[in-house]
Amino acid sequence: MPNATVDLFWSFRSPYSYISTPSALEVQHCYRVSLVFRPVLPLALRDPDFFTPANAKRLKYLQLDWARRAEMLGLPHVWPSPDPLVHDAETMRIAGEQPYLHRLTRLGVEAQRRGRGLEFAAEVSRLLFGGTRGWDQGDHLAQATARAGLDLADMERALDDSHEQAIEANHQALEASGHWGVPTFVFDGEPFFGQDRIDTLCWRLDQRGLRQA
């Protein structure tokens, strides 16, 4: 039985969250830990001033870096169509209504409640970033959910105000962890930010003797 907990703060619009999921699944499999999937809304919604035309170089670099990192890891890498963040690509103005992200994040909370949070995240993020155009149409999302061992229609029926409360609690817990970005793993109060810090997390878990025999 797991005897330690690792929280994973993760966003459905984050390409780095997407490329972290295979390694996160390995952590879940290889260590005696309970990995708690804690979805959050992207930084563009939590802090709209972070991505603005004034810091366009930051965005340009991220667009370059995530794609080459995914290529290095052998993962498909295409920007989602439609983009789950509703915004003006030139002005970076964020729309008031965000139907995609609120739906996906609430479903992520429900998936975790059903014990398949990380599996759901892995399948849905591969749907978004793996090149499926019109991922929001037809039965694409239902099929991805089924591959994670869940039923989309049943999950949708379960959504209520408690899911929004859980998302807000995740936002607060991420801030309290000492970081703000995703993916962030937190073990024993210590944050490990970024998909390229999972090896450091594993080093720490090894120090605590938590690797499966």
Image (cartoon, rainbow, N blue to C red):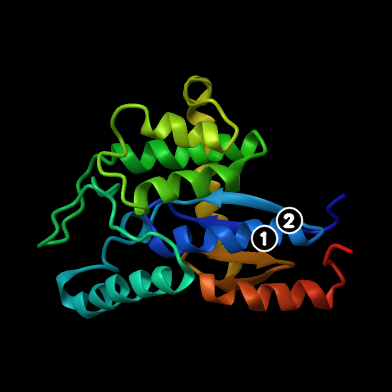
The relative height of residue 136 versus residue 122 in the rendered view (above or below) is above
Looking at the rendered structure, the secondary structure element under dot 1 is helix
Residue 102: image location, x then y, percent: 38, 39
Q: How many marks?
A: 2
- What residue do we see at 60% from left, 50% from top? 37
- What residue do we see at 43% from left, 50% from top? 126
Labels 2 and 1 touching (C-beta < 8 A): yes
Q: Which mark is residue 29?
A: 2
Give the alpha-carbon distance from disc 2 to disc 1, as whole Å: 5 Å
Q: Which mark is residue 200?
A: none
Q: Nearer the viewer, residue 73 or 94?
A: 73
Residue 52: image location, x then y, percent: 20, 69
- What residue do we see at 64% from left, 36% from top? 113
Residue 156: image location, x then y, percent: 47, 24
Quarter of the image with the C terminus is bottom right
Q: Nearer the viewer, residue 206 or 108?
A: 206
Quadrant of the rendered structure where residue 65 is? bottom left
Say whether residue 26 is left or right of residue 120.
right
Quadrant of the rendered structure where residue 82 is? top left
Looking at the rendered structure, the secondary structure element under dot 2 is helix
How many C-alpha atoms fall within 10 Å of the one at disc 1: few (<14), some, or many (≥20)? few
Quadrant of the rendered structure where residue 143 is? top left
Q: Amino acid at mark 2?
A: His
Say whether residue 209 is left or right of residue 49.
right
- What residue do we see at 26% from left, 44% from top? 133
Which residue in the protein does label 1 denote?
Answer: 26
Extreme residue toward the left, this view: 90
Q: Amino acid at mark 1?
A: Glu
Q: Nearer the viewer, residue 211 or 68?
A: 68
Residue 4: image location, x then y, percent: 81, 59
The relative height of residue 39 versus residue 113 in the rendered view (above or below) is below
How many C-alpha atoms fall within 10 Å of the one at disc 2: few (<14), some, or many (≥20)? some
